[in-house]
């Protein structure tokens, strides 16, 4: 699951133990599993319930996060650059090539994104004082403020998301999801980037 943490608070109803309500044109989870079993008799309904629920949850979280990050005046693509620079640690700077590698982007797509963000005051792009050939991308105060606002909003959203789970249940769920993630990372170590650029 791609890390989109930090878009913000979404209006999310409390989830119950019953099957999720379908969207306007989407079958319920039970209906989907029943249809799959009808067409593919070897299907394991328990496995399908888990992976389908994860897929739907991921999709809805990404939509909610995308709507909220727009309220901050930045795009999903820009958020990912801010996050990557923060994760690099103070003074929050990286070369364009390293940024592109960490985000799974081509150099051209990374350049385009940096140009846009520099114009918006979220990052600066200057020559390295110790190596004039090297370019450094650095987070601005405005960029860090946007990141902090997003993280505060994310905390509220994620607390809403997990409100029906006890502390013990959250711990168990987290451990199980990490186990699944580790298996996927081991089986597909090169799947952390993108198949195509998003810009």
Image: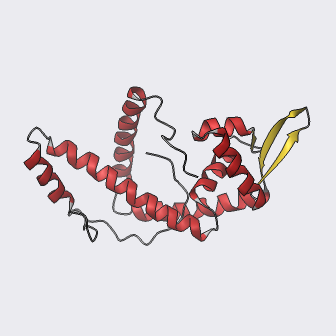
Which color mode does the image show? Answer: secondary structure
- In the rendered image, is residue 77 in sight? yes
From the top left corner, tell me how far across and down residue 124 is, in percent.
81, 51
Q: Is residue 35 left or right of residue 165?
A: left
Query: Which residue is at the front of the view, 63 or 11?
Result: 63
Q: Where residue 10 appears, x then y in whole percent?
A: 46, 69
For this rendering, which residue is in front, 106 or 99? 106
Instruction: Say which residue appears at 51% left-offset and 67% top-offset.
Output: 67
Quarter of the figure with residue 161: bottom left
Q: In the figure, 193 relative to 199: above or below?
A: above
Instruction: Give x and y (percent) for residue 36.
Output: 14, 49
Residue 174 % position (x, y): 39, 45
Question: Which residue corresponds to the image point at 11% horizontal and 53% vertical from the top-left?
Answer: 34
Q: Is residue 131 above or below residue 2?
A: above
Count the numbered circles shown: 0
Indicate left or right for 143 with 60 as reference: right
Residue at the outermost front position: 108
130 above or below 91?
above
129 vs 4, left or right, is right
Q: Is residue 157 left or right of residue 27?
A: right
- The residue positioned 85% from the left and 45% from the top of the image is 126
Q: Is residue 166 visible?
A: no
Quarter of the image with the N terminus is top left
Quadrant for residue 110, please give it.
Answer: top right
């Amino acid at each position: 699951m791609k890390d989109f943490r930090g878009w913000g608070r979404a209006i999310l109803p409390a989830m119950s133990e019953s099957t999720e309500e379908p969207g306007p044109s989407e079958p319920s989870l039970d209906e989907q599993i029943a249809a799959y079993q009808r067409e593919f008799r070897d299907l394991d309904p328990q496995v399908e319930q888990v992976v389908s629920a994860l897929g739907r949850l991921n999709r809805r979280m990404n939509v909610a996060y995308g709507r909220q990050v727009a309220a901050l005046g930045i795009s999903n693509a820009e958020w990912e650059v801010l996050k990557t620079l923060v994760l690099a640690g103070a003074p929050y700077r990286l070369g364009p090539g390293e940024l592109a590698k960490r985000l799974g982007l081509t150099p051209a797509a990374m350049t385009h994104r940096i140009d846009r963000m520099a114009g918006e005051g979220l990052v600066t792009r200057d020559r390295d004082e110790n190596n004039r050939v090297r370019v450094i991308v650095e987070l601005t105060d405005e960029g860090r403020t946007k990141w902090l606002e997003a993280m505060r909003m994310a905390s509220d959203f994620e607390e809403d998301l997990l409100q029906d789970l006890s502390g013990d249940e959250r711990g168990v769920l987290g451990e199980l999801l990490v186990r699944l993630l580790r298996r996927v990372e081991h089986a597909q170590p090169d799947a952390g980037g993108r198949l195509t650029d998003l810009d």
